[in-house]
Amino acid sequence: MLEYNVSKGILDSYHTKLKSALDSDAIIVGSGPSGLVAGYFLAKAGKKVVMFERELAPGGGIWGGGMFFNDVMVQEEAATILSEIGVELPEVKDNFYTIDSVYLASTLISKAVEAGVTLLNMISIEDIIFAKDESIGGVVLNWAPVHKEHMHVDPLMAISRCVLDATGHPSEIVNVLTRKNEITLNTKTGKVMGERSLKCKKAELATAENTCEIYPRLFVSGMAANGVAGAYRMGPVFGGMIRSGKKVAEQMLQCIDTEAPIYD
């Protein structure tokens, strides 16, 4: 029966993909611009990359452009990175490219998956896993509806050599880590400092500057990096996010090539 074959084919394929995703070189939480760029470069370097996205549609805040006007701005400084990925750019004006947000989001998603990223949507990350040396060793995952409906359903776990918090403004992974554990972050205060109000120029520079290993084997990029470090937000300007994604990929490659976490 066609109905049976359709259902069985989807179940067989998805569960093969999910089982493979439980052990990886890099886990990326969030599929916004910095996460997609990071995933692309990690996968192109031959690493096994798994990306978990809570929403139905990957792409983060790119889709909506500025206040539902579906265009975004990207500075000329980030253009070479987009070109390397395969994004076609319009004519530059006053050091900015105005890019259709639907095209940018869909292209970054497509290029990341083509490079080898396993992207699993509708999955929420609700906690982290500690390795034996107290570094980050993976994440705790559940279906997004379980999280949104506050259902008491036990999760599954995925281990990895390193984890990237690319959850945007909420900085969710780092906030869970600090809320539930007595740890010190790589920030001025040792804690999550919180996002400041909008200041485009400073925020754009800070996005790349704050991209770092915030705790052993846990990295931050994009607005998650600014939220943790107490920096400004920037609105529908994406050059800093793009540069942050490539920078964190380079940092994570160094982490992946060191000794893997040891588990109890």
Image (cartoon, grey):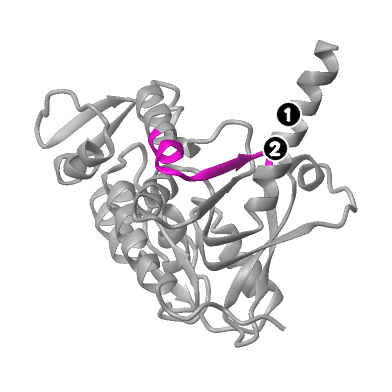
Between 107 and 243, which is closer to the camera in this rendering?
Answer: 107
Q: Residue at x 35, y 36 (%)?
A: 236
Q: Secondary structure at mark 1?
A: helix
Q: Residue at x 45, y 27 (%)?
A: 64
Q: Residue at x 42, y 50 (%)?
A: 39
Q: Which part of the image, by quadrant, shows the N terminus?
A: top right
Image position of 132 with respect to 127: above or below: below
Residue at mark 2: 14
Q: Is residue 116 magenta?
A: yes
Image position of 201 with respect to 110: above or below: below
Are the residues flagged by discs 2 and 1 in contact, CB closer than 8 Å?
yes
Q: Going by the image, does 74 lie left or right of 145? A: left
Q: Is residue 210 magenta?
A: no
Mark seen at residue 148: none
Instruction: Identify the magenta region.
Output: 111-123
Q: Position of residue 222 (x, y in %)?
A: 40, 53
